[in-house]
Amino acid sequence: MTGRRIVLATHNPHKVEEFGGIVSRVRPDLELVGYDGPEPVEDGVTFAENALIKARTAAAHTGLPALADDSGICVDVLGGAPGVFSAYWAGHRKDSTANLALLLDQLSDVADRHRAARFVSTIALVTPDGDEHVVEGVWPGRLATAPRGENGFGYDPAFIPDGDDRTAAELSPEEKNATSHRARAFVALAELLRAL
């Protein structure tokens, strides 16, 4: 592929695949490459802080413009938790199965009308010369009482987007890429990517 390269600051292959589909729609000539450098300590307390930490590290390590996403699920009845702690909700191992099981257990007695939730994606774009931009996408919905579907990861099997009866894990990858929190963040990021 010809054109500019940009690095995605993650070691998560699911995110590389998902971002690749979204980036190709915005900038078909932009080559998204994976990141194999050191993982920074994500010690921010907001999605934006953590996204910037990751993007700054990847840009400095590779010398390429870097994209980084920090995302999670925010549940209204839990005051917005797990939020920025979504990846570690059940402990320090980033065990997505345990995270989902714990969240659903915590909501086991919560009525459907109080199960509102939203996925939030904050994307940072950092260039090697120090330009920094942050955008956010929000995907509103509610939580199912049990996981369903095979197409997603993380909390996808329990998240039902507004206007649908299927979970995010029951959507096709194309449907999810067109409507997800990351896709919504990329709408805001599109002009920045076009300018690269």
Image: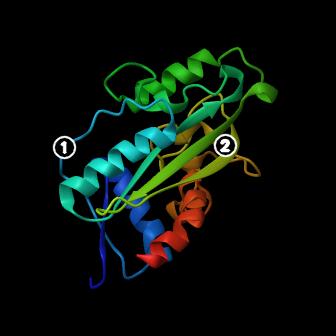
> Is the C terminus in the top left, top right, bottom left or bottom right quadrant?
bottom left
Question: Reading the chain from its start, which is encountered first: label 2 or label 1?
Answer: 1
Residue 109 in the image: state x and y as whole percent. 70, 14
**Which residue type carries mark 2?**
Ile
Q: Say which of 42 and 153 sits in front.
A: 42
The disc at residue 155 is: none
Alpha carbon separation for disc pair 2 and 1: 35 Å
Residue 147 vs residue 34: left or right? right
Q: Say which of 116 and 133 sits in front.
A: 133
**Which residue type carries mark 1?**
Pro
Closer to viewer: mark 2 or mark 1: 1
Q: Identify the residue at horizontal 50%, vertical 75% (top origin).
A: 26
> Is the N terminus in the top left, top right, bottom left or bottom right quadrant?
bottom left
Residue 135 vs residue 161: left or right? left
Q: Identify the residue at horizontal 70%, vertical 45% (top origin).
A: 140
Q: Is 171 placed above or below 48 here?
A: below
Q: Identify the residue at horizontal 48%, vertical 78% (top origin).
A: 194
Query: Callout 2: 10 Å neighbours few (<14), some, many (20+)?
Result: many
Residue 13 visible in image: yes
Q: In which quarter of the view is residue 16 placed?
A: bottom left
Q: Is 45 placed above or below 195 here?
A: above
- The secondary element bearing badge 2 is classed as strand
Q: Say which of 66 and 142 sits in front.
A: 66
Disc 2 target residue:
160
Q: In which quarter of the view is residue 7 placed?
A: bottom left
Q: Is 35 placed above or below 48 here?
A: below
Query: Callout 1: 10 Å neighbours few (<14), some, many (20+)?
Result: few
Query: Seen from this angle, which residue lies furthest bottom?
Result: 2
Residue 193 in the image: state x and y as whole percent. 46, 72
- The secondary element bearing badge 1 is classed as loop
